[in-house]
Every structure is written in structure tokens, then in C-alpha cells.
Image: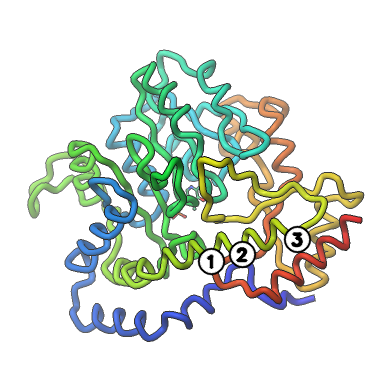
Amino acid sequence: MRETFPFVNLKAQYLAYQSELDAKISKVLSSSAFIMGEEVRLCEQSLAVFSGTRYAKTTSSGTTALLLALLALGIKPNDEVITSPFSFIAAAEMIAFIGAKPVFVDIDERTYHIDVHKIESAITPKTKAILPVSLFGMPCDMDSINSIASCYALPVIEDAAQSFGATYKQKRSCHLSTIGVTSFFPSKPLGCYGDGGAVFCDDEEIDHQITLLRHHGQSERYTHQIIGMNARLDSLQCAILNVKLQHFAEEIRLREEKARFYNENLQGVILPYIPKDRSSVYAQYSIRACNSSHSRQKIIESLHQKGVPIAVHYPLPLHLQECFAFLGYKKGDFPVSERVAEEIFSLPFSAFITQEEQIKVIESLNALMI
Ligand SMILES: *Cc1c(COP(=O)(O)O)cnc(C)c1O
């Protein structure tokens, strides 16, 4: 059967803010200021205020934000960076892209985040940074990670592509370590209408490096201090973010309310685990149904037949991806990641999912759990 409602309802969000968005987009179009300028400056100011960091710089994507963060910290070929094998590929990919080596550490079975108890044994003299991923919208246990890092004088980059807006001990994700990186991919908790991202930090020198790197290493026009690239976010996307940021606090509240509705009504599944010191923005509402007599495949097929869209984040851990074969990992190296990758799936979710839609998901799924 055709899906009867979307996995993430971007259309409903657009319609809710349409007059503001259309007006802002027209304003940018008639200004002819498309690169940098006022909307970008405003956006970065608002992002810094929101996250509580001294600095925020927008970038062309979350992936380039990760790349700039690694480069700003001086990560070089043959350096090692510790990260999670159960994630979207971008962080491990950018580590490898600059010739450094992603060193994977297995995840914790409850949070799906890098297992903080296993990080220390992966540190070698070549380790130059730790890059935890605040997966599914909840910040990692950053105090534990920061304290291990500080013992070895290592910087920490939080991949907060999914967790912008979430909190850890009252502080915002992106402001929990040396550098925080996020993505504004359309379906992320705060999305623009194309690709986009941002880098957050409190350190003036790191911010200066990010500023140079994203704009051809340019200190003034046609004066190039370092080798950089073009990784700027354009004014239209910043203008769109400036509108959406006004509504973001309310969207976070709605996301929490809708997650609670799933939590309270789903039966027999492993729900998202949110420790008391944190909040989640539920970039994905991901569950496991390992007690069902049906396989994940069967559950997903059956839900699709009822018109309920389902996605799997992520079906194959990174250490088993073909592109990382050169790292020499094999099946069995990270058993928790491998098992979770086989069991997990994500339910339709956004600030705009309706209660009728959620009830349809819940009833369809609960019927498979008895
Ligand atoms: C989406 C995502 C990224 C990459 O962001 P893009 O804007 O798509 O480049 C990086 N890390 C994680 C965990 C993500 O979910």
C-alpha cells in the first residue's frame, strides 16, 4: 500500500510558517545579496545565542562542518580519531577523507552512543581527537568523554547533527565540548531547504581557523593566509533558518510531547532511553522489537502494508562498509553495534505528526507485538 502520511512532515511545517518564509525569501531575492551578508550574520548570532557558545559559523553542510572542525584542530594524515561505528557515515568519512584513521569503539546498548567505558583502551600515541555522535537527538555522556579526553589532552568534537536543541545537564548540545558540529539537512530537527550546517565553539583561535577554512583561507579579499575551500552557507538558507529558529523552541516542545505519546502507548518494544540529565530532540524515534515473534523485516513489511512509513537508521555498521575495508575491521569486532543495526527501526516522527497518525502507527505496531 502507498504510504498514507510522510515519515517527516516537511510540508506541514512549511504551510505553518508559509507567509513568514515566503516574505523572507522574497526579501533576499530582491536584495541580490546571496553570499554572506546580513542574513548570515543574523543567523550565526542567533545560533550562538541559542546554543550558548561564543561563536557559531554556518557551513554548506553538516559534512563540511565536520571537515572544517577536524582541519581547525590540525588533524593530519595518519592521526587517529576515535568515533562510533553505529552512525551516519559523515564523521568517520571526513576523518578518513583527510587521510586520518577512524578508530571505532563499540556502542552502549541502551543509548546507542559510543561506550564511554571502552574509549580509554582505544587511545594510542597517534590519537588526536575523540568524536562522539549524539545519535538520534540525545547528547552523549559528554562529562565522561571530556574527562577521559582531558587526561590525554585531546580535543572533543561533538557530532550534534541530530541533537541541535537537546540538552545535557541544562547545557545545549553543540556547547558540550571543544567543538560542536550540526547539520541543517531538511529533515534534521532544525532544517533549512537544502544542505547546511554549522560549527560551534568558545575558542577564538578555533573560530578564526573555521572562518578562514570555509572561505578559501581568505583574511581579506584575495589575500589567502591558509589553504581552505568554499564551505559557506548561502544567505537564502540562513534567511530560512532565521524564520524557523523563531519557532524552534515550540517545535522542541511538540517533539517531546509526541515522543511521550509513543512512549506511553507502544507495547512490548524497547523505547528510546533518555537518562535524567538529558533531553532529546528525537531526530529519529528509534525502537527495537526483539521480543516480537516477527523479524524486523516482517514488521517493516507489515507496517508498510498498512500505510505506515518506516526507516532503518542504520542497517550496516560503519566498520563493515566497503569503503572502510582498508581499516581491516571484520564482523564480530563491535558486537553491540552489529546487533543493534539488525534490530533497530525508526517510526514516523516530526513536530507536525498528528495524533491520528501516531495512533495508526501505535495500533499497527502493537498488533504485531502480541
Ligand atoms: C546528517 C548527519 C551528518 C551530515 O550532515 P549533512 O548536512 O547531511 O552533511 C553527520 N552526522 C550525523 C550523525 C548525521 O545524522
Q: Nearer the viewer, residue 127 or 294?
A: 294
Amino acid marked by disc 2: Lys
Q: Is 370 situated left or right of 153 in this image?
A: right
Callout count: 3
Under tag 1, what secondary structure?
helix
Q: Are marks 1 and 2 in contact (CB under 8 Å)?
A: yes
Give residue 226's position: percent from left, percent from top: 17, 39
Give residue 364's position: percent from left, percent from top: 82, 66
Give residue 95's position: percent from left, percent from top: 43, 35
Amino acid marked by disc 3: Asn
Cα distance between the residues tagged 1 and 3: 17 Å
Give the mark nearest the N terminus, 2 or 3: 2
Q: Which residue in the structure is indicated by mark 3? A: 265
Q: Which residue in the structure is indicated by mark 2? A: 258
Q: Residue at x 67, y 73 (%)?
A: 355
**Residue 254 circle label:** 1
Give the mark nearest the N terminus, 1 or 3: 1
